[in-house]
Image (cartoon, rainbow, N blue to C red):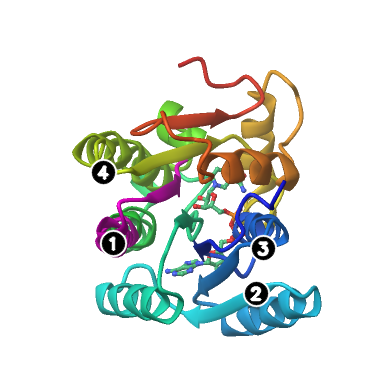
Amino acid sequence: MSPRFENQVAVITGGAAGIGRHVALRLAGEGATVALWDVDQAALDAAQAEFTGKGFKVETAKVDVGDEQSVAGTMVAVATRNGRIDALVHCAGIVGPNARKITEVTVDEFDRVMRVNTRGSFLVTKHALLAMQPRGYGRILLFASIAGKEGNAGMCSYSTSKAAVIGLVKSVGKEFAESGITINAIAPGVIRTAMVDALEPRQVTYMTDKIPMKRTGTLDEVAALSCWAVSSEASFTTAFTFDLSGGRATY
Ligand SMILES: NC(=O)c1ccc[n+]([C@@H]2O[C@H](COP(=O)([O-])OP(=O)(O)OC[C@H]3O[C@@H](n4cnc5c(N)ncnc54)[C@H](O)[C@@H]3O)[C@@H](O)[C@H]2O)c1
């Protein structure tokens, strides 16, 4: 059997670290050319060296997902250079204020989270669709969160921004349902990455205690579901948000 992603090209935002890097490693290991986008140039350089060292096909670009010019220009450049974009895995995101009530959150802090998480999801989805449409094939996977389904106390900006991601895939998945392009999301519970390590410990305890399996998810578990969701096998699911929460989500 040939590798699942042989001859395919995948864009992974937030691809220099955490979930994005891990999903990209698996996609590349299964044959894909991966385009890693991130705002962290040092992490991009390290990822470029790591992927190249493993013999993987990789390109990197410094892209702020909240900046339309940067997203649009880089998407066209990747599609032109490689002749195609088969998959987008959008992992770039920030948490913002946590362990703080709404009355302690400034509007600038709120706007910053919405800009990266919600506006960023809108922009990468829009420009990936423009790149994928001519070929009539594509897989778009966004990262929501259990916080978007259930709301985490102490994280109002983040919870709001991720609920919006769920709404975005519900809407756009239907708009493009007959196009050969699927648009889905994953809503993880707690996955141990730098993002979680940066949270207030009491916020992490609050979230992990709500998981019936009583543990955090692993990067391998995220990569397994993500890669299936952006494979050609995942052909009858769109406008959907997959659960990855150790039993926390009940809908
Ligand atoms: N880790 C978890 O427990 C968890 C749970 C639910 C949802 N998520 C979501 O999964 C995604 C990945 O999370 P993670 O834990 O790997 O986070 P992470 O902080 O480890 O990695 C996020 C990456 O995104 C990059 N980034 C931040 N702002 C950016 C921007 N404006 N443009 C481009 N890149 C940017 C960062 O530099 C970083 O490399 C996020 O959307 C996050 O909200 C994570």
Residue that appears at 60% across and 55% down:
5
Gap between marks 2 and 4, in whole Å? 28 Å
Q: Do residues under tags 4 and 3 come within 8 Å of each other at their CB atoms?
A: no
2 or 1: mark nearer the eye: 2
* Residue bearing mark 1: 123
Marks 2 and 1, how far apart in space? 25 Å
Q: Indicate left or right for 222 with 118 as reference.
A: right
Residue visible at 42% across and 76% down in the picture: 78
Q: CA distance from mark 3 to mark 1?
A: 24 Å
Q: Which residue is mark 4?
A: 179
Q: Which residue is mark 3?
A: 28
Residue at the spot 32% in from the left edge and 53% down from the top edge: 118
* Whole-percent x, y for residue 146 in the image: 50, 33
| Between discs 2 and 4, the one toward the N terminus | 2
- Amino acid type, callout 1: Leu
| Position above or below: 82 against 250 | below
Q: What segment is highlighted magenta in the picture?
A: 124-144
* Whole-number angstrom distance, CA of label 1 to CA of label 4: 19 Å
Q: Secondary structure at mark 4?
A: loop
Tell which tag, 3 or 1, sits nearer the viewer.
3
Residue hosting label 2: 57
